[in-house]
Image: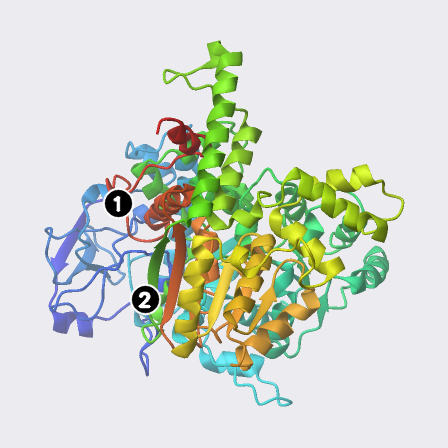
Amino acid sequence: MKRVFDWISDDEWENHRFGTSRVFKKLDCPRPPIESFAYQPGKCKPSEEQTGVCSAGRAFNLEEEEEEEAAVVRPAQGGGRVRRFVVDEDSDVEVLPEVVEIRSTGEDDEDFTFGGDEAEEEGGEWEGEDLVGKALQKCGKISAALRQELYGSSVSSCERYAEVDASAARIVTQGDIDAACTCLATDFEPVLKPYQLVGVNFLLLLYRKRIGGAILADEMGLGKTVQAVTYLNLLKHLDNDPGPHLIVCPASLLENWERELKKWCPSFSIILFHGAGRTAYSKELNSLGKAGLSPPFNVLVTCYSLFERRIGPQKDDRKVLKHWQWGCVLMDEAHALKDKSSYRWKSLMSIAKTARQRLMLTGTPLQNDLYELWSLLEFMMPDIFANDDADLKKRLNAEDNDLIARIKSIMGPFVLRRLKSDVMQQLSPKIQQVEYVYMVADQSECYNEAICEYRAATQARANKFPSGTTNNNIAPLPNRQISNYFMQFRKIANHPLLLRRVYKDEDVVRVAKKLYPRGVFGFECSLEKVIKEIMNYNDYEIHQLLISYGGIGVEGALSDIHVLGSAKCQALTKLLPSLKMNGHRVLIFSQWTSMLDILEWTLDVIGVTYSRLDGSTQVSERQSLVDTFNNDPSIFACLLSTRAGGQGLNLIGADTVIIHDMDFNPQIDRQAEDRCHRIGQRKPVTIYRLVTKGTVDENIYEIAKRKLVLDAAVLESATDLGNENVAPEKTMGEILSALLLV
């Protein structure tokens, strides 16, 4: 149907009379920007002529029936002024004309796409057999419904709460938070920051629109936990939904979740389904469930380990969780579900698939590649993203700019991500510093010996299987052997004591004979078995064995000179005293507990106080250890394993992070960094990465940088994957092959 557009002045716009369904709210005070309701990594800066309203500049989708109800006119490129038109029909109508605001987006026309049937009618780019295209079409319909809920069918884009349609769901304010969370028994004041209030409204909007999944992907340290527990409380008080809700998190965060729930949800009944108490709870809950009774709790908190074993008590305890339909199944550190083929993913999905909503919290939704991100999206919204295509992984791992842009569009309706730089201008800066260190003589000799051994093994295989050699006369080793050699190189780059080099075979026999009569490995164990066992120990483990059963100074034990026999430990002897003198406190991360043992020895030699948290630390002790470190400034350093200590913990008592050995996955290290760079931190935070020159450390660092480029392209504003300054990603085998050509 033909439409007529008449330009109207500002005065006419202000005095225009709307239909009853088009009443705009008048606000007494400015609200937080609406832009955070949608995933918008790039911000459009308005010109001076604009009235403070910035166009979202994002592709939008219209339902079939909406295409006849709204029209869009795009002004000439570069026009900064907002133009307003009255839209009317040629024919006589008795209803008031609608008003549409037209803004320059700064994007080309082809960036605007229609989803669903509209794409087919317009000859859109999404092919019927294209998995990503199909998902985009479905997401487009959801996006259109959300946009209509917020802005009404006549306004295509809006960035102010003042322009939200009166029929839209009511915006939750701080007053609602006060009413729901305040407890007279405590002096706690439940105040949310403006961006956190926006996050809660985002989750409530999806819930009220019956959208079954969401990802709260705020950068680490912005308070995702607080937003989530506030959301659950508001479901009870505003939407009459008391649960039950299921929260799944790493074991190290169980106590923190329990603490935050008690603080922000004082009326909730909470069960911590973990440890010794889980068996008792399991029997009681199983009886109630079989009897068809309501659950005696609002929230049940458990950890991922419950979903990792096919047999045993975990299997029986999981059955208990199937007695009730869950309101919200919330996964903290949800990147733990990045592998859809894992048993953890499948067993948790069997519980979560019937929930009214699946909410995922992760500051690092993209860890390695797009396939892992797709696993999260499929868990969140299986009806849209489920797919058994065998080639899916290959297609998603291809670094295709067009594919990345399309996946960004897919994520729009469900993913909310804010960066600290966007919403926390007052947050202290984070300074990144790479410290290159050079191997000491013995360490370098050890590394070169390992390379020679690897080359000899490769040459031996080439001689044995000449038909399997490459153009460079290289015969690739089996994957397991490649992995072993690569790990050996990594260990030497960190510390030679992680291998057995000081203690020769004859030394091992001598140590075994000394310990055997004491029954160190059990009196039923023969001397031959003791020797065989110790042969597999590294130098530091043999040293510890001697110390444990012979005391310090026992014959054969290593000296302090040995612990300082690595470039990284020598660097720490200079760096840590300087940091301590200047009033800093430090977190030191390593991937290996054996390396943490060596670092403990190093800190003892330096003479500084420290605490330690790793996977062996009892779950019940972790929160108290964190509290003690934060509140006791006499503890200079905290040693943490990257996996156990790098997730969810709040360690703002420190202002310096040392990444002793980097992970192939840079997001793991990012999480470690943000243990102290988060809300409440008042000092600038400095990150030191120790990289041993001339070793595989450098290759790992380049791989990490490459993955961060992909992360920025998908989740933030960067889109250029063709950066010539970034080294191409290499596999372990490719890195080792390069050593053969030197």
Nearer the observer: mark 2 or 1; the answer is 2
- Position of the N terminus by quadrant: top left
Residue plotted at (64% across, 68% down):
622
Q: How many marks?
A: 2
Q: Disc 2 designates what residue?
A: 422
How far from the left and from the top, in percent, is residue 63?
Answer: 37, 46
How far from the left and from the top, in percent, is residue 707?
Answer: 38, 45
Residue plotted at (24% across, 71% down):
17
Residue plotted at (11% across, 51% down):
77
- Position of the C terminus by quadrant: top left
In this picture, residue 713 sits left or right of residue 368: left
Residue 414 visible in this rendered orientation of the protein? no
Q: Could you tell me the amino acid type at mark 2?
A: Asp
Give the number of the disc on residue 112: 1
Q: Quadrant of residue 230?
A: bottom right
How far from the left and from the top, in percent, is residue 526?
Answer: 85, 40
Q: Label 1's element?
A: loop
Q: Could you tell me the amino acid type at mark 1?
A: Phe
Q: Label 2's element?
A: helix
Query: 481 above or below 115?
Result: above
Viewer-side residue, 561 vs 396:
561
How far from the left and from the top, in percent, is residue 43?
Answer: 26, 60
Q: CA distance from mark 2 to mark 1?
A: 25 Å
Residue 399 visible in this rendered orientation of the protein? yes
